[in-house]
Image (cartoon, rainbow, N blue to C red):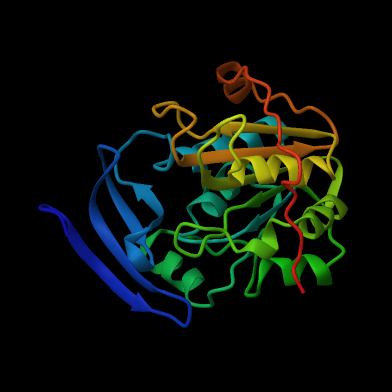
Amino acid sequence: MAFGEKLVAEVTTPYAHYRVVDGRYNGRPARVLFGSGASPQSGLALDDDPELLFDYIQRFLEIAESVRPASILLIGGGAFTLPKAMLEHFPDARVDVVEIDPELPQLARDYFNLPIDDHLHIYTEDGRHYLERTDTQYDLIVLDAFAGYTIPTQLLTLEAAEKYHDHLSDTGVLTINFISGYERYHMSLAQRLVATFGAVFPVVEMYRAGRELPVDLEQNLLLVTSNHKPALDYLQAGEERLWQALDDAILRDVY
């Protein structure tokens, strides 16, 4: 740990080794959940600034504020800071969270102030399995499920995209946090996701979670897909380029 950091808890689960650390993150006092490989999973700011600690989580919340969802599906719980924020901002909405690691909900309650709330429903299973077994539709689906620094491939394929589409309401929005760089003529995860989800959804847009890095460098990017063009004032004001996918970039299930 760096100077000034305090280890609050250390937990090993069937899926990962986690550390809860108090210190500074992005220049702010914070409590952060680190996963295997020292990857930061999520965190809670310990100051009075209302903006969420991780820029991509703040962007998710801003997307939700544009959508005003009555029903929300979050695939990937982490420290449950986004579900907590959703409950605070949309107290009447149904918030369903699918988290494969059975230890994380209690860890979030113990160390990250996750409340007990009748509107919060937690399902301990794989996100793709949940999509295949439920018929519930949502106004907003958020995919933020990582193993280290990567998303399990079965959540990103064409077949998965079709499942997300089936579970969105008519005006619903799907958004995905992933790590990649983007170059127009270079095959990257960003290119593959634009192609894959563009084969299912008429609207596919991509944004940087923050604006500090050039877009060709690896960073958190957000894919936003829908059957209609959503009004996302903050995001759309900052990104003017048209994202074009390369041929043969579609991700498919491998059997």
Towards the viewer: 218 or 205: 218
The answer to whether residue 173 shows anywhere in this view is: no
Residue 124 placed where, x, y %? 62, 75
Residue 49 placed where, x, y %? 36, 33
| Above/below status of 8 relative to 182 | below
Towards the viewer: 184 or 126: 184
Question: Left or right: where does residue 97 sit relative to residue 221?
Answer: right
| Above/below status of 149 relative to 13 | above
Residue 192 placed where, x, y %? 67, 45
| Circle count | 0
Question: Left or right: where does residue 248 sit relative to residue 32?
Answer: right
Q: Quadrant of the C terminus?
A: bottom right
Residue in the image at 83% along x and 40% along y: 201
Residue in the image at 69% along x and 65% along y: 154
Towards the viewer: 97 or 49: 97
Residue in the image at 59% along x and 72% along y: 100
